[in-house]
Image (tube, rainbow, N blue to C red):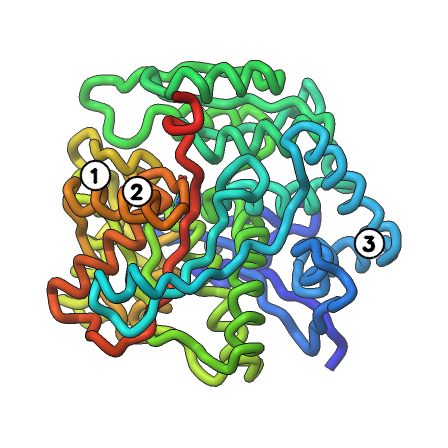
Amino acid sequence: MKPGVQLRCFGCGATPAAANPFVCPNRGQGDVDHVIRRHLVGEHPLDTMQTEPFLRYRRRLASWHLGRAAGGTDPVWVARVKALDHAIADLDGHGFRVAPVVELSELAELVEVGSIEAKVEIGNVSGSHKARHLFGLALHLHGKLTPSEAQPLAIASCGNAALAAAVVARAAGWPLKVFIPVDAPEPVVKRLHALYADVQVCERQPGVAGDPTYHAFQAAVQAGALPFCCQGPDNGMAIEGGMTLGYEWIEHWAKTGVVPDHLVIQVGGGALGSALAAAIAEAVADGAIPRAPTLHVVQTEGAGPMLRALDALASTGEAVAQAVTHRSDFMWPWETTPASIAHGILDDETYDWAALAEQVQATGGRGVRVSEAQLQEAHDYAHEVGIKSCVTGAAGLAGLMALVAQGHIGPTDRVAILFSGVDREEAHR
Ligand SMILES: Cc1ncc(COP(=O)(O)O)c(C=O)c1O
Ligand SMILES: [Zn+2]
């Protein structure tokens, strides 16, 4: 079969318009979870000569396939990635790298599991995995839609996603509007200004559910801005940049011949978890790895819309493919203002809940709620083993500890976790 890619809405099955592969043409219609997903067709070999993730895995990116279908060539694509990576390095110290995987044997003993392998993403571009989503999007935009003052990029975020967007947009020379909450951390706001982002502060309105920055972002997109975000419903192509993280991990598992028993992932808006879930499902279907690890998702006591959705799925016994046709029975904004020390996973909604729920169900995983004390403890453990993760970035470890305490992960089990963000508070002290 000729290698290629197909784009389809998971909620309604529609194919997006060629000029706008980002959103479902039926978005907003019915109580349907419209998210464009991409499916690979045929073979998509790695480029083992490359160590930069977007080059190594480029033949799996829809942006690469769509670019070629539009008459672009591989050498031009490679040169574009290199140029953008260099521009990022000038702004942020270095371009994209494969995130290292480390064995944490002392921590495994302490937590009472067989082994813990941690993928450490905190040293990557802008200090978190978010830059991968946005670099993936930048590769889609190039050559098709050129952002301009009249049609800027837009994102809503209070931290890592905003910083990542600002670095990538600045490297590409594109204008960016960033919608932030009133309590966004000062160092983040400063850095956004330094990167020439157009920063707009949004207040919560009494009686209006949902994140005010997200509402403002959606209004900007309605007015013509391009969704440069980390949410699949607003831009389905945001997911695939994050899949490079999954591809790296899968390659590691294939090389070592050991697929972990469990993968425990922190979930906010759900794009990270969805990207990992999609990469793993694809690898199992392709035979790259023999089976998937059991996928568990972690949220806080302060906000758990994903956990609520998993509970609703379990109690109705419904398949996710069916549930996406009546979304509001599973996913709606958290009723109270979310609060936790894990700021990055406080999204009012898990926008990308469906792909994630599918893989949790398919692998027999669970949702786990962690306390503030567990989050703090996980953060401190990470620092003790020399990984300067933020609290959110260490929330997978907190989830692992909770799953062990509940008896869902046992003393001989092999577990994988991800440290997804650097501790900026520490860095700024
Ligand atoms: C460090 C870190 N880890 C994990 C997440 C969660 O990712 P997602 O919102 O895609 O679920 C975030 C989101 O802000 C984050 O900043
Ligand atoms: Zn749709």
Q: Is residue 207 above or below residue 256?
A: above
Relative placement, left or right, of 317 versus 233 is left
Count numbered badges in the picture: 3
Q: Which mark is residue 334?
A: 1
Q: Is residue 88 above or below residue 208?
A: below
The reply to whether discs 2 and 1 touch (Cβ–Cβ < 8 Å) is yes
Whether residue 330 is visible, yes or no, is no
Q: Residue at x 55, y 35 (%)?
A: 126
Disc 3 or disc 2, which is closer to the eye?
2
The amino acid type of the residue labelled 1 equals Trp
Q: Which mark is residue 349?
A: 2
The amino acid type of the residue labelled 2 equals Glu
Mark 2 element type:
loop
Residue 26 image position (x, y, % from top left): 49, 49
Q: Residue at x 66, y 58 (%)?
A: 62
Q: Which mark is residue 70?
A: 3
The tag earlier along the polypeptide, 3 or 2, is 3
Quarter of the image where ligand 1 sits: top left
CA separation in Å, label 2 and label 1:
7 Å
The amino acid type of the residue labelled 3 equals Ala
Q: Is residue 66 above or below residue 366?
A: above
Mark 1 element type:
loop
